[in-house]
Amino acid sequence: MALRELPRRVGPTLANDARLIARPLGTTQYRNASSQTRTTPEVFEDLERSSLASPGPSEDIVKSFDPVGRSRQRQGKLPPSRYQFRPPKYYRGPLHPHQPPPQSSPESRLFVPGPFSLPRLEQHYHNTIAPDLLTLAYSHLPPGFVPPPKAPRLRTWDDSSPYHKNRPARGPRGGDVLRLLKRPTNFHNITKLEKVTIHTMVKGAMEDSAHLHVAGMVVQAITSIRATSCKAKESVAGFGLRGGKYTSVKAEIVGESMYHFLSRLVDVVLPRIKDWKGAKGSSGDSSGNISFGLTPEAVGLFPEVEVNYDMSVAPRSRIKQTC
Amino acid sequence: MPVPWQLSVSRILAKADTIIASTPTKQLDEMNVGQSSARSLALLICWSARETTVCKSCLRRQYSISAAVESTSAISMSHAPPVVQAPSPQLAFRIRAGVVLSRPPQITRNQTPFEKAFFFYQRRLNERLVLPFSRYFYFKAGTPADLEWKRKQAERSTPAKDIGVYNAYGEMAWDDELLVDAKESEPETQVDCLLKDAEAPGVGSDEMGGLRKEVVERPMPRVTEADRKGDQRSLDRRLDRTLYLLVKGSEGRWGFPASALIGRENLHEAAERILIQSGGVNMNTWVVGNVPIGHYHFDYPNPLPIKDGVRESGEKTFFMKARIMAGQADLKKNELGLVDFKWLAKEEIEKAVGPRYWKSLKSMLAEQ
């Protein structure tokens, strides 16, 4: 029945829409995305006005507004239900009356505050690096250009020998691993930083887990998130590793804290490393991942860690300053 | 099946053969050109077609080459001035290269009032939600650093240095919002707080017995001397914006430095040449990529007189992107007849250039 009623319901809806679309078509045949749009289209005039655009409170209200004084003058306490809300600890299904708030709400148990700043490195990426990468990666295809058909990624045998029958296809030339497929770069898939993973393996943790706690605190200090510990997958007798034992700590940072971490690394730590030869050119998998290591001395150059080093050797550093 | 390029070359060869066949043998002897050199002649014609007026990609099309051959053959084949002109001169555009030389932003942009309020709110919220600062982990009890920490903690009631006086664990923790005209959310105030925290006199004394005060360097101001003077030639102005080099030609028009292509050079080479010819060698620049980022098309009011069988009806300027790393433009020895230069942000360029020029270049300039 519902399907039968569909044309009857769709008809007036389309008629309403057609009235809106007809007007712009009448004035201009086409419109470029970059050309000037009208300041306030009529269709948006019915929308609710934002409170940000409205003028602020009057002078009298500003002067008399004293929330702390008013709460001190209050005789009795407000009932807790007025100012305390505890989200449910467990999700009991969509029909339960006590639903958890969304994760973006500060009342949620899953809420993570932030962002706290506009990182300089992120702005540099958006202003300078991304447009240049787009220019560098642009390849011009004339209108009407049809790319030649590509050969299959896995090569087939040419059947020159009877032994070729039923053989599986061959891998690409130069190696057995199929390389990643690459899309042509355009404005919405420019190369960008997604995630930084800091990982450290602590050999001493096999005997004494206290080493792991120290490493965890160091990683937490330089990344500003809680580090997670990882187990060894397999036993390696040569390294003294035993499978299933916690041997390393790891932290993955994204977004704002990732940019702050990288700027500290690039601007503060790396320039201060003596005789640093740079990250190895062959490191990484040429598909977007790159990794390099830092010595314990280099990690000590992070400002957050250095503060603690300074404390333990305070007398010496003070002498240095007076000289 | 031959590719178009081979096809056009074979057509040129056929054309050259017919030209040679139709030329009197006496004249051919004078020119010392034999039948065997038809191929080299065709190549010569090919290269002569690669004048500044036709770009390389256009050359690959058959019709332009055949037209060029038709027009140049009369000139190259006879000593005397041509008796019969090419029947219809080819209409062409002058190809020019322009350079959009830019200095990227040096400092972060100014925060909007909303961003200031939001970030400050999130910071205080963070203080309320994180676990309390574990002083005993970081400071040994009774050490000077511990005393210093206690003093600062008593001053601001919170471990965070730049969120003002706020106790996230006290009775009034709910009072985390700022009143009208409060200065705590301003970045300048926060910088002052951080400096004050770093500069505060230490409790430990040096050998002389006096208080040790660390000298902390203040960050440089965001507004520079050039901003205050309105010096538009300085590269130190508008540090939070992308600045573009605009030059004033001899006819008094502002625009990006540009020049016609010379010989067989490509756009990238032309851009590097233009940078040196206009701004001098005292600029450390990098031309980004080999492809233009935009173009400007201008039709002459009256087409130019026919030259080499080609009538130029307009010009097309292709803009290459370049970055300046160091140095400054110097027009003293420029070879493009430039009079003046400026470093301008996007909205200043709009006022300096003409509306048609602005329309073709506005989408290749960065907003910030």
Image (cartoon, grey):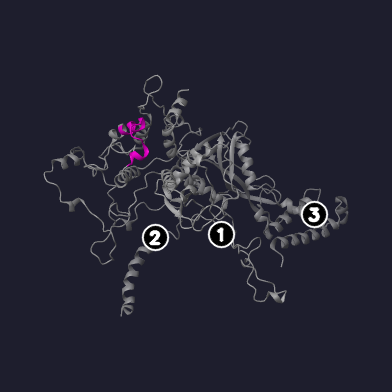
The image position of residue A264, as x and y in percent, is 46, 41
Residue at 71% x, 77% y is A162
The image position of residue B287, as x and y in percent, is 59, 44
Q: CA distance from mark 1 to mark 2?
A: 40 Å
User: Is disc 2 in the same subunit as disc 3?
Assistant: no
Report in which chain the residue with disc 2 lies.
A
Residues packed near mark 3 inside 10 Å, few (<14), some (14 to 19) or many (20 plus): many
**For residue B59, side relative to residue A212 (left or right):** right
Q: Give the residue number, with chain letter if any, for mark 3.
A: B41
Count all numbered tags in the image, as a single digit: 3
Q: Give the residue number, with chain letter if any, for mark 2.
A: A24
Question: Callout 1, which amino acid?
Answer: Lys
Residue A139 is inside the magenta segment: no
The span picked out in magenta is: B133-150
Question: Callout 2, which amino acid?
Answer: Pro
Question: Callout 3, which amino acid?
Answer: Leu
Residue at 45% x, 23% y is A322
The image position of residue B61, as x and y in percent, is 67, 59
Q: CA distance from mark 3 to mark 1?
A: 44 Å
Q: Which mark is residue A182?
A: 1
Quarter assignment of residue B26: bottom right
Of the pair B198 and B251, the residue shown nearer to us? B198
Secondary structure state at the residue bearing disc 2: helix
Q: Is residue A273 above or below residue B264?
A: above
Residues packed near mark 2 inside 10 Å, few (<14), some (14 to 19) or many (20 plus): few
Of the pair B283 and B56, the residue shown nearer to us? B283
- For the N terminus of chain A, give its image quadrant: bottom left
